[in-house]
């Protein structure tokens, strides 16, 4: 079950400045009996082709402490890799327009009801697989099971993000961001350059998936890492907080935190 909020999570009451970096306290989460405090690090809007290590050096290194874990939005990694597709390069055909009429909408990003996203999926996976996945998904929904389409087509299609006309950032109105290439390698490069333990995550208000991690986190199960940010502290709006520093605070007193009140259903566009 998802947890939804209206608008931005960056409350002024939780805002702090340290070493020239702005961050927002996101509260304490207890995982496997350990108390972790999370800090959402605010950045500029990261454009295509920027250097991930340089960005982390600027925004995360001044706050990082040994033992911290940093989660990195997969979208930022893909933007740095320029692993994107522009809408003008996607030519929507008959099947994408037709099948998108029967797809369900998605409150945590664009779904296959967006013809451009569906056409991009067809381009990536081929029409036969998309037709089969669409058929199986439709049958499964009759029996109350969802997500079958993405189980068949794979995480790379599920991870397409963009072509979203309601995004707070105009760039994403006509740009799709794909899953990052070799996220384990990206994390290893960050750890080698900055000695920062990190994981690349695909997180929203429904679920968290670990796509890659640095060598020092190799022994940490995906579920354990995902649980640290299960409530999606990076946010789903225009927070500009793609990096979350997760810190074991033991029995120490947590920083003051004013939570954003959850709403009972997804916000309406």
Image (cartoon, grey):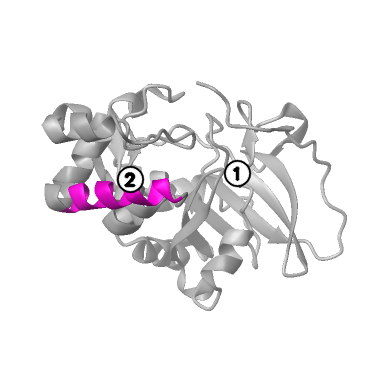
Residue 164 shows in this picture: yes
Q: Earlier in the sequence, mark 1 or mark 2?
A: 1
Q: Quadrant of residue 34?
A: bottom right
Q: Residue at x 51, y 61 (%)?
A: 198
141, above or below 189, in the image: above
Q: Nearer the viewer, residue 154 or 237?
A: 154
Q: Residue at x 19, y 34 (%)?
A: 96
Q: Residue 76 colored magenta? A: no
Q: Nearer the viewer, residue 151 or 158?
A: 151
User: Which range of residues does the magenta coloring cover?
Assistant: 129-143
Residue 111, given in percent of the width and then of the height, sits at 36, 37
* Left or right: 14 as drawn, with respect to 99: right
Q: Residue 133 colored magenta? A: yes
Dots 1 and 2: beta carbons under 8 Å?
no
* Left or right: 48 as drawn, with respect to 67: left
* Left or right: 161 as drawn, with respect to 37: left
Q: Residue at x 66, y 47 (%)?
A: 39
Residue 65, given in percent of the width and then of the height, sits at 66, 61
Q: Nearer the viewer, residue 198 or 120?
A: 120
Q: Nearer the viewer, residue 142 or 9?
A: 142
223, above or below 172, in the image: below
Q: Please tell me whether the stretch drawn in magenta is mainly helix, strand or loop.
A: helix
Q: Residue furthest bottom?
A: 219
Q: Quadrant of residue 116?
A: top left
Q: Residue furthest front?
A: 142
Residue 158, given in percent of the width and then of the height, sits at 35, 49
Residue 126, given in percent of the width and then of the height, sits at 13, 50
Residue 179 shows in this picture: no
Q: Nearer the viewer, mark 1 or mark 2?
A: 2
Residue picked out by circle 2: 138
Secondary structure under the numbered disc 1 in the rendered image: loop
Residue picked out by circle 1: 2
């Amino acid at each position: 079950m998802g947890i939804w909020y209206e608008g931005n999570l960056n409350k002024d009451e939780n805002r702090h400045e340290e070493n020239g970096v702005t961050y927002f306290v996101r509260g304490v989460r207890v995982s496997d009996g350990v108390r972790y405090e999370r800090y959402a690090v605010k950045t500029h809007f990261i454009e295509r082709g920027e250097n991930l290590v340089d960005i982390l050096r600027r925004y995360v290194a001044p706050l990082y402490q040994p033992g911290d874990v940093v989660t990195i939005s997969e979208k930022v990694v893909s933007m740095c890799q320029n692993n994107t597709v522009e809408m003008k390069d996607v030519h929507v055909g008959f099947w994408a327009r037709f099948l998108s009429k029967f797809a369900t909408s998605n409150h945590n990003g664009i779904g296959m009801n967006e013809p451009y996203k569906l056409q991009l999926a067809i381009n990536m996976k081929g029409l036969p697989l998309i037709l089969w996945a669409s058929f199986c998904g439709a049958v499964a929904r009759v029996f109350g099971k969802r997500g079958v389409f993405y189980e068949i087509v794979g995480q790379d299609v599920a991870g397409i993000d963009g072509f979203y006309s309601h995004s707070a950032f105009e760039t994403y109105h006509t740009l799709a961001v794909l899953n990052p290439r070799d996220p384990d390698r990206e994390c290893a490069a960050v750890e080698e350059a900055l000695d920062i333990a990190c994981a690349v995550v695909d997180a929203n208000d429904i679920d968290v998936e670990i796509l890659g991690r640095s060598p020092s986190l190799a022994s940490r199960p995906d579920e354990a890492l995902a649980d640290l940010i299960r409530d999606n502290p990076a946010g789903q709006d225009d927070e500009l907080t793609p990096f979350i520093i997760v810190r074991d605070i033991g029995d120490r007193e947590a920083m003051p935190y004013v939570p954003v009140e959850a709403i009972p259903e997804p916000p309406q566009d």
